[in-house]
Image (spheres, rainbow, N blue to C red):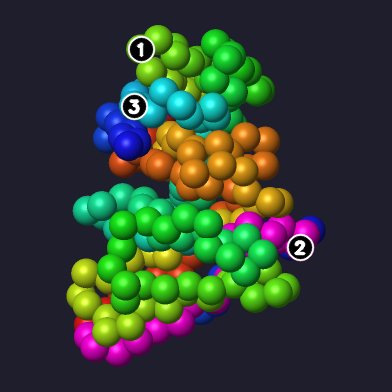
Amino acid sequence: KAGVTQTPRYLIKTRGQQVTLSCSPISGHRSVSWYQQTPGQGLQFLFEYFSETQRNKGNFPGRFSGRQFSNSRSEMNVSTLELGDSALYLCASSLVGTPGGGTDTQYFGPGTRLTVL
Amino acid sequence: GEDVEQSLFLSVREGDSSVINCTYTDSSSTYLYWYKQEPGAGLQLLTYIFSNMDMKQDQRLTVLLNKKDKHLSLRIADTQTGDSAIYFCAESSDYKLSFGAGTTVTVRA
């Protein structure tokens, strides 16, 4: 079974631009989560979607948004890019996503490396 | 809120055991996880433990949980060069994982 795929793998943008990242979950998985990884802040939760509905959102400005499609694929968008948005963006999928985790574990993709110049 | 803490670095000789420690604060967490990240890669789930367990063993990996002290550890037996990576502990609540800063494990010959 194919794993979580993310496109593109690498992206270079300039300040003020916007960017859209894509995530395809493991077949049959309906919950998709997004995380930002930076050297300074570590891994931080952005948002989680299930059946096209956002169930939880992390503490990020409104410039960060996401959505999920009926086939469970998800996109996240960052508008008006800032230098500090340079990071590895990781997507994870799980079957249904349970509030406390558990055996319905999250499987991560390889990430999209975003560089903002 | 959640706050997960780990030591940042660990150096171990090949063949020895590695022990990575983690403390967490959210006592409502029912599951705790260990993930591994190799350079340029995403996160790989290594193992997890249910909060009513004290220990879980999976081949070379042993997880110990002290719920009273909110302390979690991961022991890797017979550490190999392929074990060099960053290891993250994480707790789960509200559909999200909260991660520690990660422990960089370096295996020396």
Crowd class of label 1 (few under 14; some 14 to 19; many from 20; radius 10 Å):
few
Residue type at the position of mark 1: Asp
What chain is tagged by disc 1?
B
Res B24 quadrant in image: top left
Give the residue at x 53% y 47%. B95
- Start-end of magenta stretch: A14-33
Give the residue at x 53% y 63%. A54
**Element carrying mark 1:** loop
| Residue A19 counted in the magenta span | yes
Residue type at the position of mark 3: Thr
Res A65 quadrant in image: bottom left
Quadrant placement of the N terminus of chain B: top left
Crowd class of label 2 (few under 14; some 14 to 19; many from 20; radius 10 Å):
some
Residue that numbered label 1 is attached to = B69
Residue that numbered label 3 is attached to = B25
State the image coordinates of residue A50 (x, y, percent, origin top left). 62, 60
State the image coordinates of residue B74 (x, y, percent, origin top left). 47, 23
Tell me the mark number nearer the camera, choosing from 2 and 3. 3
Residue type at the position of mark 2: Ser
| Residue A65 counted in the magenta span | no
Q: Are marks 2 and 1 in contact (CB under 8 Å)?
A: no
Q: Do we see residue A114 in this rendering?
A: no
